[in-house]
Image (tube, rainbow, N blue to C red):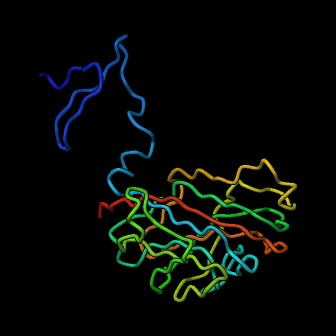
Amino acid sequence: MDFYQTRVGPMFAPDGTPAPTRGLRNGGYGIGDVQGRYYEQASRGNLYTLTMSAWTGNIAAGNILGAAAAASTQFALWNPIGSKYDISILKFTVNITSGTLPISGLWHSLGTPAPTIAPSLAATSYIGNHKADVAIYDGNAGYLTHVSGTVLTGGGATRGIREAGLIFSAGTFLNLAGVSFMDVCDGDIVLPPNSFWVPTWAAAGTSVLGGYSVTFEVVQRSA
């Protein structure tokens, strides 16, 4: 077969196999996703989710905008120094269960250097999108979930890079019914080696309780 031709219909081939472009029965080119957007990376074991179902004791200082170095933090993800991968954030979710939220809502914040503590998960957390039995990530990312907050030893100060676009005004949980709490980042936040990410609120609010999750892809660096 001339591989510069177009072939109509789905194709099934192992990695590295030359293949023609895909065509449609009506003569057009097939340019749509063959599977769901994240299927390939999930099936290849490159997609992970870090989750904490509930934090306690209000929002920790390390999850407030402009957090100082080594602040006490409830939820964080980092790329260790010397890593051979980039970490690409795809989705972020916050689930508020009670309290009065602060004005200006929630931000994505980055910092450097990355924390030097060992990865740590609370009992209510997990990582792994490919197999249900993969509970702990294999070491290419650092992570922390702690219901009351613990010190990010070695981690630098954080800087907000953009609002998460989830909550824009102060209000109680009941007043915010119907607000979308998922930010589909789709790879617009990337952690190179020796950097970290935390969700940060504009202020502590009043008795705010809830949970977090972040879905990320690991991408091998070209150099």
Q: Residue at x 44, y 46 (%)?
A: 38
**161 horizontally vs 195: left or right:** right
Give the image quarter of residue 135: bottom left
Identify the residue at image location x=52%, y=73%.
Answer: 196
**Quadrant (top left/top right/bottom left/bottom right) for the C terminus:** bottom left
Residue 210 in the image: x percent, y percent? 71, 67
Q: Quadrant of residue 97?
A: bottom right
Report x, y in % for residue 198: 60, 71
Above or below, 35 against 160 in this view is above
| Residue at the spot 50% in from the left edge and 53% down from the top edge | 187
Residue 76 in the figure: left or right of residue 88: right
- Which of 12/192 is in front? 12
- Please tell me which residue lies in front, 166 or 123: 123
Dividing the picture into quadrants, the one containing residue 166 is bottom right
- The residue shown at (82%, 74%) is 207
Residue 119 x %, y %: 46, 80
Quarter of the image with the N terminus is top left
Hey, which residue is sitting farthest left in the picture? 1
The foreground one among 88 and 215 is 215
- Count of picture labels: 0
Image x and y of residue 132, in percent: 41, 60
